[in-house]
Image: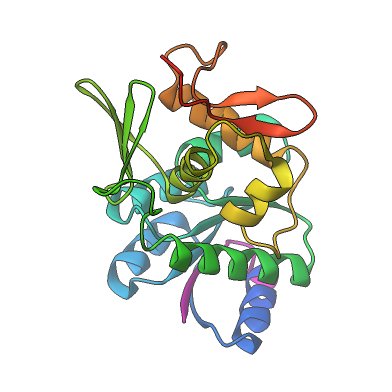
Amino acid sequence: MSILIAEDDPHLRAGIVDLLSLEGFQCQIADDGAKALALFQAAKPEICVLDVMMPVMDGLTLCREIRRIDPLVPILLLSARGEEIDRVRGLEIGADDYVAKPFSARELVARIKAALRRTKVQGAPARTEPDGRLRMGDLEIDQKAMRAYRGEQRIDLTSREVAILAALYERRGQAVSRDELFDLCWGRDYMPNSRALDQYVSALRKKIEVDPASPRIIRTVHGVGYRYDEDVE
């Protein structure tokens, strides 16, 4: 399995390559974002691990460019910048996960494997509607195209955002716990950062809710998780 590693720190990059090579990955490496983008286009890796702070093209810009080319490939961001706003920005532009430095070898491998497992599971849309579309209030979600529509408005979604909406739709009217959403959308091996799910939901609400401050589709169930009610207008 091919993995793109974009990291400008030579020591950290070598360590990641050694680690993932032992796990059976074929590593494609780049030390700046521009080289990584060219390598992605040429090698078509099955997963990407991108450092946020890189020369020439930073990791967030690279993530956005890769997501335009391939809406499904899993993308993990690495960064020592642990502020919430940086994590949220990465999630909003299409990253699947955010790993803060320093991280353990076990954590990185677990997150990569969970992302790959989730992508395989999400290869087929949730079996909820005959046409593969979810209708949540005035929002129509095309799982195959990974897009949502509100009238003439088109909203591009990431694979994990679709997974979250599908999980809530399948359990409509019920509170879905944070742990269950992590299992369904990240994988059972996933070791979440603090508030990772809440950050994802916040970013998703900004995309799909008419008024993110008063959400009608993804409702918070305090102390439990989230719920979608089918009677939403």
- Total numbered labels: 0
Residue 6 located within the stretch drawn in magenta: yes
Residue 218: image quadrant is: top right
Which residue shows up at 53% across the image and 39% down it? Answer: 168
Which residue shows up at 42% across the image and 25% down it? Answer: 208
In the image, 220: left or right of 166?
right
In the image, 132: left or right of 187?
left
Q: Residue furthest left?
A: 152
Vertical comparison of 59 with 198: above or below: below
- In the rendered image, residue 109, in percent from the top left (x then y), is placed at 67, 71
Q: How was the colour assigned to the protein in this rendering?
A: rainbow
Residue 106: image quadrant is: bottom right
Vertical comparison of 148 with 4: above or below: above
Vertical comparison of 189 with 169: above or below: below
Q: Quadrant of the C terminus?
A: top left
In the image, 61: left or right of 151?
right
64 or 182, nearer to the observer: 182
In the image, 58: left or right of 128?
right
Task: Report the span colored magenta.
Answer: 1-11
- In the rendered image, residue 91, in percent from the top left (x then y), is placed at 54, 40
84 or 123, nearer to the observer: 123
Vertical comparison of 20 with 30: above or below: below
Residue 125 located within the stretch drawn in magenta: no
Is residue 80 visible in the rendered image? The answer is no
191 or 32, nearer to the observer: 191
195 or 12, nearer to the observer: 195
- In the rendered image, residue 11, in percent from the top left (x then y), is placed at 70, 71
Which residue shows up at 62% across the image and 34% down it? Answer: 174
Is residue 76 visible in the rendered image? The answer is yes
Which residue shows up at 33% across the image and 71% down it? Answer: 44
- In the rendered image, residue 112, in percent from the top left (x then y), is placed at 60, 67
